[in-house]
Image: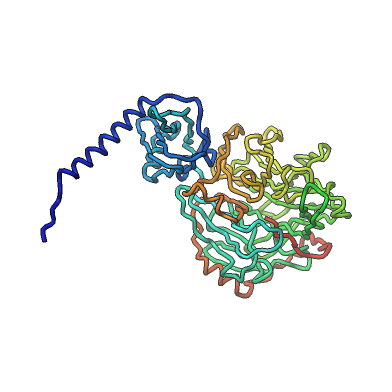
Amino acid sequence: MKIQIHIRPVISILLFWSALALSCSERLSEARSSEDCPPIFPDYKEITVPVNIAPLNFRLEPGGKCKVLFSARDYQFTLSVSDYVNIPLTKWRHLLEQAQGDKVTVTIYTPDQDGWIAHRPFHWYISPDPIDSHLVYRLIEPTYANWNEMGIYQRELSSFSEKEIIANDKTGHNCMNCHSFNQGDPDQMVLHMRKINPGTILIKDGSVVKLETKTEYTISNFVYPYWHPSGKDIAFSTNNTQMSFFEANSKLIEVYDLYSDIVLYDTDKNEVYTSPLLSDKEQLENFPVFSPDGKKLYFCSCPRVDSLPQDFDRVKYRLCSIDFDVDRQEFASKVDTLVDLVSEGKGVSLPSISPDGRYILCSVASSGCFLSWDKESDLYLYDTRTKSFKPAKALNTDYSESYTNWSSNSRWIVFSSRRLDGVYNRPFIAYIGENGEIGKPFLLPQKDPDFYQDLFKAYNLPQLVKGAVKVNPHEIAETAKSAVSGQVKFRKDGHVPSASGKSGNKSEVN
């Protein structure tokens, strides 16, 4: 059977579409200008982004057929879209290369009966300062005490690739939390397993071990961690945490400590030690953070309140610091109070320090230290040079802004916010300059602009990491299900605190 190829009709069709494309191009150049700029989601207008970020795909609101022109210096391209703008990765990377240190201009064209309307363009400012390659976070349903599925995942920020580090379907559907890295090093990681297969998982020097961390002298198992930059020691809080619900209160829930201390864990000797200034039974010490040079430990402290939850509004933390000698593993004999907002009716929580040591971001609210669910929670910036403490206005909304983390070059921050719907924590990224100026934050890009509307899990503890975590999830799971590698011992040649109060951490709030 002969196959007849009708060349002339095919050529005619190709010529028709070529002419149509040329006509559209010509008509775009003749488009009428409008000062209106259509709303988009996520709101990616006038933002500063790193040169190695994934495509900023967005949705038009309202949707409809349109054309979008992207231009940077001598490079430009146009996408014909309907509702959703999904930028091809190859074109995107070329665009960022061209715009590095400059800007991308985005112009949306919509059709009308007379041709095309060119709407007022918006811009993306492309910083040559890269962001760390990966973001690690826990995905968990936003509940108070119960859960079904959760896991810790890593996302490559230059693409949309997400991989599991460990998920609880491999560990008996237990709780896993408080993941932490040493200065963003993916090869030095710690996390906790709770209730089922309990223990602390330590990843270091190519090994994965499980630790039993409760001792007769500590309030609880290890809780909130922060690595000393040497990698030898890790500071942990130990907490007796409780949770209360309210019927006639603007806050549905409050989470608080009855007791808390800070201890240091020597990873080489499998020993715990502390200072009387970090384990005062009349004080609540929490959220340890080492300075980048390792010579100072920052933390939050509050006088212990006996009548909780009735007097919860008295729980107001201060930002403090104490000098530390890593070689002798000794703390100084005095604590410095850096920020005290009690007279203003506020408290400070969740500090994070920039790797250059210049700035500390904190959460501030009227009371408490677990501020993820507190709509009052705003972010403030402390300057370690000038000692100023000011609201980070560019980051704050009427919803909760809480946990923060820094890129290794101190130019990017990631933080948790419930601003999209008041329920789910989502990760936002913002640029911060050497002098503390902060850019407009942007939502972590996803391939599908509707991704967050369809995801019924919250992002918890987003942390920037300088590479991929290479440990296999099954190795972590097998370690978690095995017997502990060793019982942590308390060093008795130093200060030994009294483990006041019933031990236990009752909160799984995210």
Q: Is residue 56 above or below residue 113?
A: below
Q: Is residue 249 visible?
A: yes
Image quarter of the N terminus? bottom left
Nearer the observer, 68 or 399: 68
Residue 212, given in percent of the width and then of the height, sits at 68, 69
Count of labels shown?
A: 0
Tell whether 252 sits left or right of 86.
right
Image quarter of the C terminus? bottom right
Q: Is residue 185 above or below residue 472?
A: above
In this view, the residue farthest toward the right is 307
Q: Is residue 324 visible?
A: no
Residue 89, given in percent of the width and then of the height, sits at 39, 46
Residue 480, given in percent of the width and then of the height, sits at 60, 70
The residue lying at 52 percent from left, 69 percent from top is 474
Q: Is residue 487 above or below residue 119?
A: below
Tell whether 41 sits left or right of 399.
left
Name the colouring of the figure.
rainbow
Nearer the observer, 451 or 162: 451
Residue 301, given in percent of the width and then of the height, sits at 78, 48
Nearer the observer, 102 or 486: 102
**Image quadrant where residue 218 sits:** bottom right
In this view, the residue farthest toward the left is 2
Q: Is residue 334 above or below residue 500?
A: above
Tell whether 447 sits left or right of 430.
left
In this view, the residue farthest toward the front is 113
